[in-house]
Image (spheres, rainbow, N blue to C red):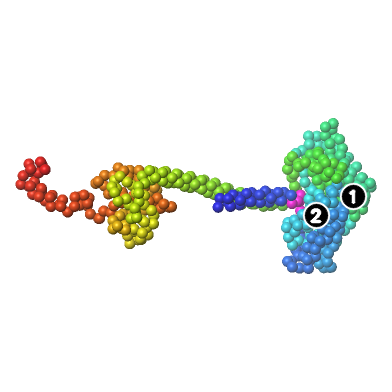
Amino acid sequence: MASILIFLLAWLLVLLNILVGVKSAERPLTDHCPSTISNYTQGSNFQSNHNRLLYRSLYNNGGNSIYAKVTEGEEPDKVHGVFLCRGDVVPKDCQKCIDVASVQILRLCPFKKQAIIWYDQCLVRYSNVSFASTPDPSASLGLYEVQNVSRPEQFMENLRTMFDNLTTQATTVNHKLKYAANSDEISPFQQLYGMVQCLPDLSAEDCRTCLKTALSRISNPFFNVYVPIGGRILGSSCNLRYELYSFLSPGGRGQEAPPPSTNQVKEDKGKNTSKTKLISIIVGVIAPLAVVLAGTSFYLVKRRKLMEREADESRQEIQFLNTVLETLRGDVSNDGFHSESRSQEFPVVKLNIISAAKEKFSEENKLGEGGFGPVYKGTLANGIAIAIKRLSRTSGQGLKEFKNEVLTARLQHRNLVRLLGCCLEGNEALLIYEFMPNKSLDFFLFGSTFYYLAYIYHEAAISSPTSYIFF
């Protein structure tokens, strides 16, 4: 039982670790589910087209390029979809990001006819209307580091210069991918890293317009006073990012970005808060259960060890009694007892003889019950009446009493009920006494004549007190 609980505890801890890890790996940067757009219904044609687009069309194009635009179905249930991976991401990582995003967008935007989800390496979007090859400002969000730079004016000047160069590069040199990334030295000990990207089917002019609009969100008067050390603007048509560390993948122009040292502040905090609550609920449910299982397992292990120790002590006592009985053992005749003086020999009787003497511990022969256990009356083959005490398996003092009786067997007094023998075989521990009828001790010691003599001396005491005192 304890091993099963320990296994379940380990399994729950592993599951907790997996759940937290999966949630961290599958957590998007943000998502956008327009509330003004009507929903589709369960089992509708739109849902079927929608599922085929996410699970088949986007998946099939994921490993071929960093960008694809696909459609599924016919009007009015036609679904349009697009994915865009970051320009430095290798095809395998692009495919993984699309797979995760296609699943999570359904979970985060259930039954929505339009939705978009952003990850660090990709975005996935679908809609019930066709995507125009012009910038779409309807979905644009900003994420910023909470720490600010020490010299905001100089930093903003460096930032504008870098993004102007990257925009030119993305719309001319890399005009097919509409992607550019680079770094500038802003001090002898510090580099500024940046990246810009547009949908590849945008024109060069539309790409410049989209990136200029995104940069204006960082260049507003607020950022002239407080400039974050890092941030990104996420849009449905373009995006940009800057950091003081290299955040590109190994296949790009930089190294894999280390995790930011500070948390990012999102303009729309509500959705991330709900995801954090979900993880908190999972931890809150599993952690107490794990503690209960751990406590139960600890208790069962301790209890098992205690029971094993008590069993060892009992086995040691029984072994000790067996040794004592070997020293006291006398010859056993066919009726179970030695025929000579019982005060000198202490027979050890076989269990089958005792069982036959009292008809296998029948309730009809039961005389009573004490701390040692039940007492039965029996008769040996030679007609001798005996009383047998049987050690109760639930008795706490029975084994101790049995040991004391056996050790003092040679010290019996004539005025005590005589211990004739014992039996210690298998799980049975029995003491065999000479049977004494249910009368007073004086009758057992002196017989019926004692009362007659006592009457004579009582009469003498009345007539002659001196003679009675002498008696």
Local secondary structure at mark 2: helix
Q: Residue at x 91, y 47 (%)?
A: 170
Specify the segment rendered in magenta. 26-33
**Residue 421 in picture, x, y percent from top left:** 33, 50
Up-down relation of residue 388 to residue 216 (above or below) = below
Q: Residue at x 87, y 42 (%)?
A: 253
Q: Residue furthest right?
A: 172
- Which residue corresponds to the image point at 71% horizontal and 51% vertical from the top-left? 22
Relative side of 309 to 385, left or right: right
Cβ–Cβ below 8 Å for labels 2 and 1?
Answer: no
How many dots with numbers? 2
Q: Find out whether residue 30 is within the magenta segment.
A: yes
| Residue 12 image offset from top left, x and y in percent | 63, 51
Pair 2/1: label in front: 2
Q: Which residue is mark 1?
A: 178
Tell me the amino acid under the disc marked 2: Ile
Left or right side of 258 for 427: left
Q: Residues within 10 Å of mark 1 (few under 14, many from 20)?
A: many
| Name of the residue lying farthest toward the left | 463
Q: In the image, 284: left or right of 464?
A: right
Q: Is 168 inside the magenta-drawn segment? A: no
User: Which of 62 and 39 lies nearest the eye of the viewer?
Assistant: 62
Amino acid on which the number 1 mark rests in the picture:
Lys
Tag of residue 98: 2
Above or below, comparing residue 209 to residue 76 in the picture: above
Q: Is residue 434 visible?
A: yes
Q: Residue at x 28, y 54 (%)?
A: 435
- Density class for disc 2 (Cα within 10 Å; few <14, some 14-19, many ≥20) is many
The residue lying toward the viewer, choosing from 367 and 338, is 338
Residue 74 lies, in percent from the top left, at 84, 68
**Could you tell me if residue 235 is visible in this image?**
no
